[in-house]
Amino acid sequence: MTPLDLLDIDASLSEEERQIRAVVRQLVDDRVRPHVAGWYENGHVPARELAREFGKLGLLGMHLTGYGCAGASAVAYGLACLELEAGDSGIRSLVSVQGSLAMYAIWRFGSEEQKQRWLPAMAAGEAIGCFGLTEPDHGSDPASMATRARRDGDDWILTGSKLWITNAPIADVGVIWARTDEGVRGFAVPMDTPGVTAREIRHKMSLRASLTGEIALDDVRLPADARLPEAIGLKAPLSCLTEARHGIVWGALGAARDCLDTALSYATTRTQFGRPLAGFQLTQAKLADMAVEWNKGLLLALHLGRLADAGKLRPDQVSVGKLNNVREALAIARECRTILGANGVSGEYPVMRHANNLESVLTYEGTSEIHQLVIGQRLTGLSAFA
């Protein structure tokens, strides 16, 4: 039991779940923590090297079955996301986009040939995937996407662009969503196909230890078998987002925990006015409030994970988790920064890095406002999206 586990939530985990958590935590301690501050400062991360290491541990698509995937539970996957994001949100994003977006889309909607071609290599980290839904002018409103796919004989021609696409600069395959005469469809696009260009987005102030890109599709010719045959309508990409958001519900708590651990350690060792910061009532009030919110968030994540493992998790329930846990994690990071004072903005401590990253996590895969509207529709039965 750690000091943060005020409610003995660890006792609700199985021995296997605790073992998986311990393995991922050790990997992060060994492979991420010693280097991540430098990766963040330099805006570079050895993503391919990390992907291969994650693949060896079965972390990529770990909640999927078959094709080299681990077939782990939703809770085990969530705990892995928590530990990865305790290292950095960008590291969790690498795993989340690979497994819950790109791999899941192929696993759920692809043909057997597509699954055999891509999933084993992706599970091993030998092939990197990205998920092309967001566009320069269409973020929260994917139904208005401008990317088009038209038939030309037996082939498809894709034209358009995608923006803010994690893993795009190094991806081997992109799951690209486009509007057709029959509605929205998905395509497994080899990124070396003529007409596909991926440009890395630089000068980010957040998620700097993550590769983000823009994808340009200039009359990209694809064979008929590039289309994901079971991906019909906008519901298909949205279901992929639900998968990924579940990991975010857990992951944000990892960033918050790392901030809390740092603040606790700092407050108990930093002396001001003749005693440790932790000995002052205001500091203890801050720590207590943050620890309560963190425990509430973990209980919520665990409940949603158990629902997912029972096959009962609804998208609006995931919206509850994403809205609450990311919002509270960001508040925790900001409050922890105040405990560290000026040191809170130093790269020697992880708190400001986590706070900056969580600003992106708050927005991507559904802004807080979008999730509020999802919950509002559940409560009232009325859609307020348009």
Image: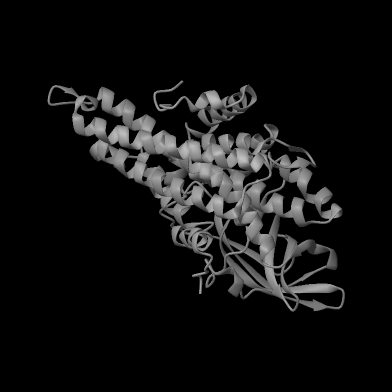
* Residue occupying image coordinates x 39% and y 45%: 328
Q: Residue 329 in the image: x percent, y percent?
A: 41, 43
Q: How many marks?
A: 0
- Of residues 215 and 359, the one nearer the viewer is 359
Residue 19, percent across and down? 61, 24
Q: In this view, does 247 lie to the left or right of 358?
A: right
Q: In this view of the protein, which residue sits in the foreground, 40 or 295?
A: 295
In percent of the image, x 81 and y 50: which residue is there? 115
- Residue 93 as seen in the image, left or right of residue 189: left
Q: Can residue 45 be seen in this view?
A: no
Above or below, comparing residue 70 to residue 324 in the picture: above
Residue 316, above or below 9 = below
Against 353, residue 237 (above or below) is below
Q: Which of 206 and 200 is in front in this view?
A: 206
Residue 366 spot, x, y in % from top left: 51, 58
Residue in view at x 76 percent, y 50 percent: 107
Is residue 195 in view? Answer: yes
- Residue at 13% x, 22% y is 274
- How does the figure colour the protein chain or chains? one colour
Q: Quadrant of residue 215?
A: bottom right
Q: Residue furthest left?
A: 273
Name the side, left or right, on which 13 lies relative to 234: left
Residue 233 position, x and y percent, is 71, 68
Q: Who is closer to the viewer here, 213 or 359?
A: 359
Q: Does 61 sit left or right of 41 as displayed?
A: right
Query: In the rendered image, which quarter is residue 305 located in?
Result: top right
